[in-house]
Image (tube, rainbow, N blue to C red):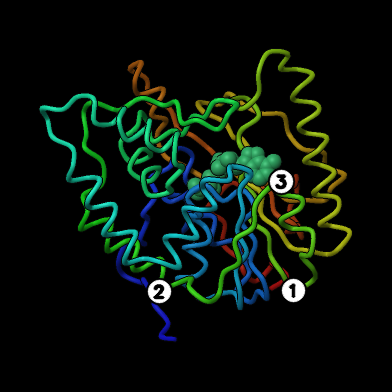
């Protein structure tokens, strides 16, 4: 199969998704090894880093998975049936008109009854902040963003075709918890982890829940380290000097990088201009003085165990 390279143009992204690493991908990519047997992205979402990795052909095969089952179905459809997904998306998208304010809700009801992944693609493209919300029965509950129509069918068809040609025949799509998705990762493989931010993902008793969630994450990281699986973990960060997540223990022996993610859109909304730094923990670590590097830093590839 022909290899597809995207050197001088932006990468294809059919799935707009809140929390996507699309913009940060080149920065994170600076710290990713070039020779990988199997690449894993077990918190898949819009698989921004997998698309980045495949565009550079850095792994022999790719494994993705998400605990949100419909996302896995959507990726399977996009990668393995690109033509029919594009046609169906165009049909759904063209069904909307300015004069039909209930159209989004009709598609949402249909998705909730039939669970067609292409209906979900349209819903994600059109919903508020591209942020998926489901109730405990798996029904899509997010509302329409009334200010936009969602990605145009021609652009969507291009993105779908490109992602499919990058990944078809090389990818395995799993489902469920990240620790199950990566249970067979081994020396020579690489895992990119982007769990939901603790501050945003958990309900009422945040302190207790944070501790539990962090303990579980640490257990999984320890398992990867014991198997000598290289990994990168995007994990919280800071805006305007305020940290918004608990740091991970130094005993894991990771290096914490702080990547400039740009100006915070939340701060801009209230009239402030604040830089956001995103944490990227990497293992194996890079030798540094205080175990923290602020990007850009010069000799990174040389010091990574590639
Ligand atoms: C921050 S998003 C990942 C975004 C992704 N990096 C991208 O570029 O779009 C986190 C994802 O992890 C999924 N998730 C949450 N808990 C999970 C778990 N325990 N195992 C696997 N996936 C999980 C969520 O459904 C969500 O899609």
Residue at the top extreme, as displayed:
204
The numbered disc on residue 177 is 3
> Reading the chain from its start, which is encountered first: label 3 or label 1?
3
Disc 3 Cβ-to-ligand 1 distance below 8 Å: yes
x and y percent of residue 249 in the render?
Answer: 82, 38
Count residues near mark 1 (Cα–Cα under 10 Å), then give few for <14, some for 14-19, many for 20+: some
Q: Which mark is residue 165?
A: 2
Q: Position of residue 237 (x, y in %)?
A: 59, 35
Image position, residue 239 (x, y; %)? 52, 28
Q: Residue 163 versus residue 8: which sits nearer the camera?
A: 163
Q: Nearer the viewer, residue 276 or 119?
A: 119
Quadrant in which the C terminus appears:
bottom right
User: Are the residues at dot 1 and dot 2 in contact (C-beta closer than 8 Å)?
Assistant: no
Identify the secondary structure beneath mark 1: loop
Q: Nearer the viewer, mark 3 or mark 1?
A: 3
Nearer to us in this view, 143 or 215: 143
Secondary structure at numbered mark 3: loop
> Where is mark 1, residue-wise?
188
The x and y percentages for residue 73 are: 51, 53
**What SS does tag 2 mark?**
helix
| CA distance separating discs 2 and 3 | 27 Å
């Amino acid at each position: 199969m022909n290899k597809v390279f995207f050197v001088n143009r932006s990468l294809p992204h059919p799935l707009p998704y809140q929390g996507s690493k699309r913009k940060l991908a080149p920065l994170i990519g600076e710290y990713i090894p070039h020779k990988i047997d199997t690449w894993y992205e077990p918190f898949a979402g819009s698989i921004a880093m997998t698309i980045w990795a495949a565009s550079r052909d850095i792994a022999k095969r790719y494994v993705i998975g998400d605990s949100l089952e419909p996302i896995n179905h959507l990726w399977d459809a996009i990668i393995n049936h690109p033509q029919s997904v594009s046609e169906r998306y165009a049909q759904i998208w063209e069904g909307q008109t300015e004069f039909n304010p209930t159209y989004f809700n009709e598609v949402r009801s249909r998705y909730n009854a039939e669970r067609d992944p292409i209906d979900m693609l349209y819903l994600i493209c059109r919903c508020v902040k591209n942020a998926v919300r489901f109730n405990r029965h798996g029904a899509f509950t997010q509302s329409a963003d009334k200010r936009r129509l969602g990605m145009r069918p021609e652009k969507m068809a291009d993105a779908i075709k490109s992602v499919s040609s990058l990944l078809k025949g090389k990818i395995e799509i799993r489902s469920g918890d990240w620790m199950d998705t990566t249970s067979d990762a081994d020396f020579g493989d690489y895992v990119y982890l982007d769990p939901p931010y603790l501050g945003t993902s958990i309900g009422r008793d945040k302190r207790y829940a944070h501790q539990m969630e962090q303990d579980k994450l640490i257990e999984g990281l320890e398992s990867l380290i014991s198997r000598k699986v290289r990994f990168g973990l995007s994990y919280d960060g800071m805006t305007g000097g305020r940290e918004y997540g608990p740091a991970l223990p130094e005993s894991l022996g990771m290096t914490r990088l702080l990547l400039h993610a740009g100006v915070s859109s939340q701060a801009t909304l209230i009239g402030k201009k604040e830089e956001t730094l995103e944490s990227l923990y990497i293992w194996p670590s890079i030798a540094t003085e205080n175990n923290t590097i602020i990007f850009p830093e010069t000799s990174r590839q040389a010091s990574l165990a590639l």
